[in-house]
Amino acid sequence: MSGWSHRHVLDLAAFSRDDYATVLELAHRFRSMPVTGARKLPALQGRLVATLFFEPSTRTRSSFELAAKRLSADVQSFSPSSSSLSKGESLLDTARTYVAMGADVLVIRHRCTDVPAQLAHELDQAGERTVVLNGGDGQHSHPSQGLLDLYTLAHHFDPHRPQPEALQGKRIGIVGDVLHSRVARSNLWALSACGADVVLCGPPSLVPDAFADFLHAPPPGQTVDPVPQRGRLQISRNLDECLSGADAVMTLRLQKERMTDHLLTDLDRYHRDYGLSHERLRRCAFSGPVLHPGPVNRGVEMSGALLDDRSICLVEDQVRNGIPIRMALLYLMAASDPVADSPRPPAPS
Ligand code: NCD
């Protein structure tokens, strides 16, 4: 694909608006194709995609594996509990093992920030062809989730042309545990790049004031911001106010496993102050969609009834869209491999 310059995909801070347009366009084509059974696409035939998840995952890992299989790649998944990690093997040596077995792509998730970036650096230094796709690192980055959320929103606002322009001037609320969320950080880069204004909403313990400076250019690891003009970022402590002016809202799981202090003791109070329900949306005259990256704590971030209401809650669309988005990423990474044959692009829908 012309213009695609990312060997590894580590952080959306490095994406230009054209990069978002490329991924969304390709995902939209993949989404409208029947790609199961005998009709799988041959694009990654003979390639090996290895998923190395050092943290639990339901959606991301299965979605990457399905995406790779729909493009006819071989898929190998790694489980820490039944591997030689338990015998003391280092993460890097584990990754090298998959490289030696011929992995073209390593999709890696780890609880520590920058593990995928360090691995990518090591592979580059060693002159390996294998590329790294970040499946979520610590609180830092979750690029494929940011992209599938972007696609889901763009498709909601413009089903015929789900492109970055669909987000221009929209106001998107992100509610809850922003502090511990790599999803929120990736969404901030993606949404602001497409011209959306983002309102982060939650108590100071979960949305510290310092987040107001998050988008200050240049992003970490970049000498200049690849996006000349981003949407604005605001912080709100009041969910009703946040909802009243918003075109869409995303709520986040309380990441208890990352909370080092007892930041929240009273979940009923949290739901009262920052939880979503039909009643609250009506009161605030909010008519947009509700998103959540999952997994959801029913009755905490949102009521069970709202989670089950597909006319408002797009959680299942997010999961469904994850596959074509990950197909697009795997396809682009394979296409930019200078040594292997380029995969044939799918026809426009
Ligand atoms: C998120 C993650 O693991 O970062 N989930 C996901 O990938 N769909 C968010 C979370 O764990 O709450």
Image (cartoon, rainbow, N blue to C red):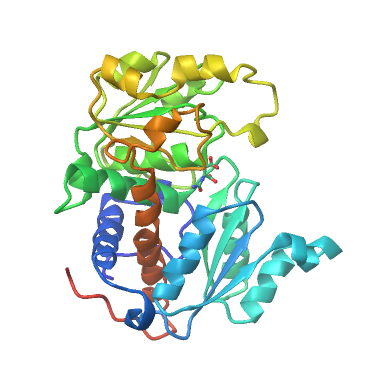
Residue 73 appears in the rendering: yes
Q: Is residue 335 above or below residue 247?
A: below
Q: Is residue 79 above or below residue 114?
A: below
Q: Nearer the viewer, residue 210 or 169?
A: 169
The image quadrant where one finds the C terminus is bottom left
Q: Nearer the viewer, residue 47 or 266?
A: 266
Residue depicted at x 36% and y 46%: 149
Q: Position of residue 52 (x, y in %)?
A: 62, 63
Q: Is residue 313 left or right of residue 11?
A: left
* Label total for image: 0
Q: Is residue 150 left or right of residue 276?
A: left
Q: Position of residue 219 (x, y in %)?
A: 43, 41
Residue depicted at x 61% and y 46%: 113
Q: Is residue 138 above or below residue 236?
A: below
Q: Single out the residue that lies furthest toward the left.
A: 160
Q: Single out the residue that lies furthest toward the right.
A: 87
Q: Is residue 260 left or right of residue 337?
A: right
Q: Nearer the viewer, residue 168 or 276?
A: 276
Q: Is residue 159 left or right of residue 67?
A: left
Residue 215 appears in the rendering: no
Question: Where, by quadrant of the figure, is residue 102 drawn?
Answer: bottom right
Residue depicted at x 58% and y 75%: 127
Q: Position of residue 325 (x, y in %)?
A: 36, 59
Question: Where, by quadrant of the figure, is residue 320 drawn?
Answer: bottom left
The image quadrant where one finds the N terminus is bottom left
Q: Position of residue 104 (x, y in %)?
A: 52, 76
